[in-house]
Image (cartoon, rainbow, N blue to C red):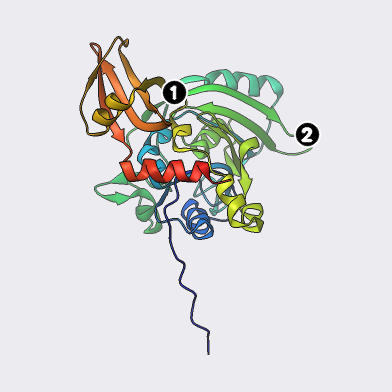
Amino acid sequence: MNAPRTRVQRRPVHGVLLLDKPLGLSSNQALQKAKWLLRAEKAGHTGTLDPLATGVLPLCFGAATKFSQLHLDADKTYEAVARLGVKTSTGDAEGEVIERRPVAVNEGDLARVQTRFTGPIRQVPPMHSALKKDGKALYEYAREGLEVERAARDVVIHSLSITAQPGSDDIHIRATVSKGTYIRTLGEDIGEALGCGAHLVALRRIATGGFHASQCVTLEAFEAMDESERIARLLPPESLVADHIRVTLGAEDAGRFLSGLRRRGGWADSPAVAVFGDRPRTFLGTAHVKAGELIPGRLLSPIEIQQTLLTEATP
């Protein structure tokens, strides 16, 4: 007879964990594991990585979940390996082989294709994606053997490097891309442009926004830590708005701002502002400035601020 499962006592946890997602786990599986290890009440992530992808996955807890949407829009950098000459049903190694073609590619071909796919391009989203059509994810249609029409989308490849892997038909791709870019599709499109087709056999996200793989902790290492070490790995919620203009308010203005009231000052217009209180210095939320008015956006609650200050004060 199985022993009863121990119930985890949840608690308020506020911050961002930079996880190096392991191969084979979905983003949600990795999130739930980290949430359980932290005993956190509330958690979310900033955009999914496929189970076959590894790398930077910022996980948000508590107050940080209010700002996770900002990193869905962030530029991202990936390293991938694409195998030329073989197309699969999914564009990656999980799918069935649907076509094989001979490979005759030289350095000049790679340079030409690299130039062609750098800058603004249009992509047709893959069928095996979570994008929805008529309220249903595309991958659900794909599982039923159906292919539905998808409109091409404008994306930007900010930088692209394509190099041959000596002794094989694999190529190495490094790309910094705008939101909404599918690296599987980029690999397939590069293969078509080379005249032989391709599919991804490896994919790693090495940066998203200002977060880099060097800052991340593996799930295995995180699991081996004690509770205080795990908490110490969390970045504060304001790390998600590091690129925002900063405004600091005195105690009276901070209180009114937190109640949703606009504040007037000599600030220049800005669409993205991170607002702080000065005594004690603490993150209050986001805002934008228009015509000298600081207009509240997403705000922390007083209890979240208090809990965050207590966490930061804990040695």
The residue under label 2 is 166
| Residue under the point 25% across and 49% down | 135
| Residue under the point 55% across and 49% down | 231
**Label for residue 256?**
none
- Residue 279's place in the image compared with 144, above or below, is above
Residue 212 shown left or right of residue 262 in the figure: right
Cα distance in 3D space between marks 1 and 2: 29 Å
Q: Can see residue 163?
A: yes
Secondary structure of the residue carrying tag 2 is loop
Q: How many marks?
A: 2
Residue 226 shown left or right of residue 28 in the figure: right
For the residue marked with disc 2, what is the amino acid? Pro
Q: In x, y percent, where is residue 239?
A: 48, 33
Secondary structure of the residue carrying tag 1 is strand
For the residue marked with disc 1, what is the amino acid? Ile
Q: Residue furthest bottom?
A: 1
Categorize mark 1 by other alpha carbons within 10 Å: few (<14), some (14-19), many (20+).
some
Categorize mark 2 by other alpha carbons within 10 Å: few (<14), some (14-19), many (20+).
few
Question: Which is nearer the eye, 223 or 139?
Answer: 223
Residue 190 shown left or right of residue 83 in the figure: left
Q: Quadrant of the C terminus?
A: top right
**Label for residue 121?**
1
Q: In x, y percent, where is residue 143?
A: 40, 58
Of labels 1 and 2, earlier in sequence is 1
| Residue under the point 50% across and 60% down | 36
Q: Residue furthest right?
A: 167
Q: In x, y percent, where is residue 238?
A: 44, 33
Q: In x, y percent, where is residue 176?
A: 54, 27
- Residue 165's place in the image compared with 42, above or below, is above
